[in-house]
Amino acid sequence: APSIVWFRDDLRIGDHPALTAAVERGAPAVCVYVLDEESPGIRALGGAARWWLHGSLEALRADLETLGATLVLRRGAAGRVIRSLVAETGADAVFWNRRYGGPERDIDAELKSGLADDGLEVRSFGANLLFEPWTIRTGQGTPYSVFTPFWRACVAAPEPRHPLPAPAPDSFEASVTDVASDDLASWHLLPTRPDWAAGLRETWTPGSAAAHERLAEFLDDRLGDYDADRDRPAIDATSRLSPHLRWGEISPFEVWNAVRERRGGAGGASGEARGRARFLAELGWREFAWHVLFHAPDLATRNWRSEFDAFPWPRLHPTALRAWEEGRTGVPLVDAGMRELWRTGSMHNRVRMVTASFLTKNLLVDWRRGEQWFWDTLVDADAAANPFNWQWVAGSGADAAPYFRVFNPMLQAKKFDPDGAYVRHWVPEIGTDDYPEPIVDLGESREAALAGYAAVKSAR
Ligand code: FAD
């Protein structure tokens, strides 16, 4: 009888333990992706994420065909869909790689015990995080709440495993071809009227092949200067792997080992050693965000520090939020970042921090409004990294001394975009009468934010 391999945020054939287990079993495989917009608690994908998913599924389908397997697409509550697929195909084994969000874990746990009760072989594997969240604990057995000691504990833990190779071509001799599948186009993942995705198409190529090319290029050309240049938005200095990691088109084990095995290359040996350590620590931030989410599944909706519930957010000024979303605040670095986001589905990390700080600390808008906008517009919109970083900037999140972090967007621009190249690229009308005055006084609004934190502190 066939095995079912359920693909989720792991749209690849290399380093895919669930797929490898199906190959080793020797039976034909039914590979399935389920678009689940029904199960309770599942967060609906944003627009840019839906665009990415379409391309990623096309790439996965082509990759699976080389193995002699077809990709079945189904829509609906995932638990129900997998059970009906078991009934239709007579499968006696179901394999998947683990997910770490709260609602997703509930779905998987219920399905696993139900199928096991029916006598099926059900196996789940670690594939999307370098360290399983329950393995990294403080001496007291509690989860870490600060990055630096968290990452120290990870680095001291057993080294992440080597990645599994992709199965050989035609690994599945007998393919299962008579299983009904949705037509991808019928999911309407791509925007039509209006088609806002031109900038995304120019900037990105979803799929594993593009992810591996990007990694190789980064290691060859940019790792040596990564530590020095990673905060400069005008320079193409970072890996730009985040959407590929978000969708699991490349695994963190593949990235980790490629970096570890790297010797020589651009920027001299010492630049490369620093670049390597810094880059691995950035992968560490991804781990940390997921570990925090694992222990606080409502990270996108609730203040991680509950005393922050006392923060006196003023009544939302809708025109201010709109101006921020559209890059018309009159603050050049903020506007540049928000326009980059709208056009390309991404934004440089330094500028993400500045735009998020400006929204929460100068416009005094609740971080959840900004998190939702990023969720809808980022191609790498990630259920852990996005709310984690928003809360980190807002001051309500997992960090040691969060209260007084207010980025001054003018000073940040001077420091990280010193010749103004990034701002001029995205805000070409800067310096003309067409460019507005700042919609808020940076000094006064900062004082108002700090007064809000005083209320939070006294609520502790
Ligand atoms: P690189 O510098 O090449 O880093 C390598 C990888 O490390 C990234 O691809 C990413 O997977 C991981 N990483 C780096 N920084 C972080 C971080 N601070 N938190 C978590 N992982 C990190 N990242 C997302 O992947 N999805 C999000 O939805 C997201 N939302 C963010 C929201 C805000 C307000 C802020 C300040 C940051 C957010 N980030 C998010 C983190 C970071 O900005 C991006 O991961 C990074 O810009 C991606 O570019 P890169 O791949 O070139 O990064």
Image (cartoon, grey):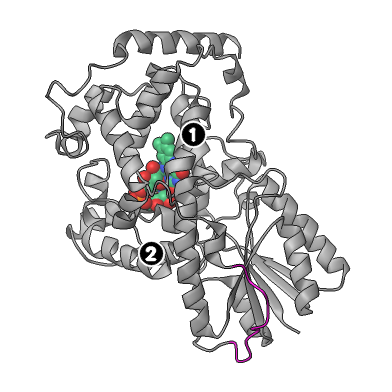
Residue 286 vertical position relative to residue 33 in the rendered view, above or below: above
In the rendered image, residue 403, in percent from the top left (x then y), is placed at 46, 20
- Mark 1 residue type: Glu
**Residue 180 painted magenta:** yes
In the rendered image, residue 450, in percent from the top left (x then y), is placed at 43, 11
Q: Is mark 1 within 8 Å of ligand 1?
A: yes
Ligand 1 falls in quadrant: top left
Q: Residues within 10 Å of mark 2 (few under 14, many from 20)?
A: many
Q: Which residue is mark 2?
A: 211
Residue 371's disc is 1
In this picture, residue 296 sits left or right of residue 145: right
- At 57% across and 68% down in the image, what residue appears? 183
- At 55% across and 86% down in the image, what residue appears? 68
In the rendered image, residue 260, in percent from the top left (x then y), is placed at 37, 64
In the rendered image, residue 299, in percent from the top left (x then y), is placed at 59, 35
Of badges 1 and 2, nearer the viewer stands 1
Contact, mark 1 vs mark 2 (Cβ under 8 Å) = no
The span from disc 1 to disc 2 (Cα, nearest Å) is 26 Å
